[in-house]
Amino acid sequence: MVDIAFGPEPGKRPDASGANARYLEMLRRKRMYGGIMMVFFVALMAAGWLTAEERNAGDFWSGLPQVIDFPAEVLTEAWMNRANIAGYAWEHFPALIETINIAAVATLIGALAAMALSLLATRGLARWPRLIPVFRRTMDALRAIPEIVIALMLIYIFGGGPVPAVIAIALHTGGALGKLFSEVAENADTKPIEGLASVGANWSQRMWFGVIPQVAPNWLSYALLRFEINVRASAILGFVGEGGIGHDLKVAMQWGQGRYDQVVAIFLLLFVTIVVIDQISDHFRHKLVKGH
């Protein structure tokens, strides 16, 4: 009799038990690895918790009920002086503009550096393939060091102000965006590049006309997302004397009681600004990526 399930040729049906056994073995292996990772994660968290408890000045559980005491004190005083909040917000608006300027300039410089580093570190596109590891490790180093650490070192060179903040954020942005840009460039179609190479185009021309038009929407989307992050980073750097609204917030909090209405005004101003920037950049990211 002809076996119609597997073709016109007569013969035995293939034995599926081997495939089932391999699948079950793979499933058991995945579960075993998952269990090992879970045990490792729990042990790591427990060890970190015990270390933090030993080095903490107080006890976590005994201090937990007091966690809302300070926010409650700030909000109570701000509510009593709520008539002053609008005036304080307007007073600190120039510092907010300085913070946005720091983030914008740092994002622009960092994005330009990331474009160059990503193309030089992308397999199949790099100008010097043997130097790909060098450029990749450079990007790793740039994004491994936090902005605040770079800023604290630059304060000794340039003094306090926006310049160290711009440099610190730009360096970290170059490393972070360079990694993302490189991953996008790796998926670019190589046919336009090959076509340009066949007519004698040099490396810069191949990148400018063959790669960048393909990756530009995603690159701009990542740059806008990074701008949101850099606005928050520039506000945080104000706490170490880098100017902007973060510096005003630090001064207001150092004075303690009596200026909590000013602290709340700065927080509200910064919160509204970040929400607005997030909505605007999100709108443009969707237009760039989706095309509508």
Image (cartoon, rainbow, N blue to C red):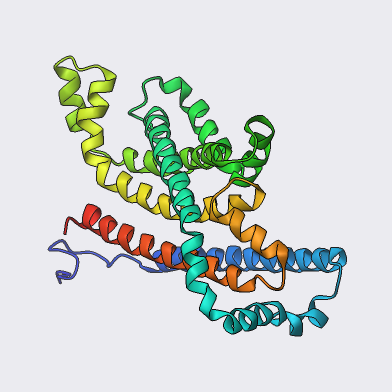
Image coords of residue 211 (percent x, y): 25, 33
From the viewer's perspective, is 58 left or right of 42?
A: right
Mark yes or no: residue 67 visible.
Answer: yes
- Is the N terminus in the top left, top right, bottom left or bottom right quadrant? bottom left
Image coords of residue 76 (percent x, y): 63, 84
From the viewer's perspective, is 93 left or right of 12?
A: right
Q: Which of the 4 image quadrants contains residue 58? A: bottom right
Image coords of residue 163 (percent x, y): 54, 37
Relative to the observer, which residue lies in front, 56 or 137? 56
Q: How many marks?
A: 0
User: Which residue appears at 77% of the width and 68% of the height?
Assistant: 49
From the viewer's perspective, is 22 left or right of 54?
A: left
User: Which residue appears at 20% of the width and 29% of the height?
Assistant: 209
User: Which residue appears at 36% of the width and 30% of the height?
Assistant: 119
Mark yes or no: residue 27 visible.
Answer: no
Relative to the observer, which residue lies in front, 214 or 3? 214
Q: Which of the 4 image quadrants contains residue 255? A: bottom right
| Image height of 127 relative to 113, above or below | above
User: Which residue appears at 40% of the width and 34% of the height?
Assistant: 118
Image coords of residue 87 (percent x, y): 49, 69
Q: Which residue sits furthest top?
A: 200
Relative to the observer, which residue lies in front, 57 or 197? 57
Relative to the observer, which residue lies in front, 166 or 222? 166
- Is the C terminus in the top left, top right, bottom left or bottom right quadrant? bottom left
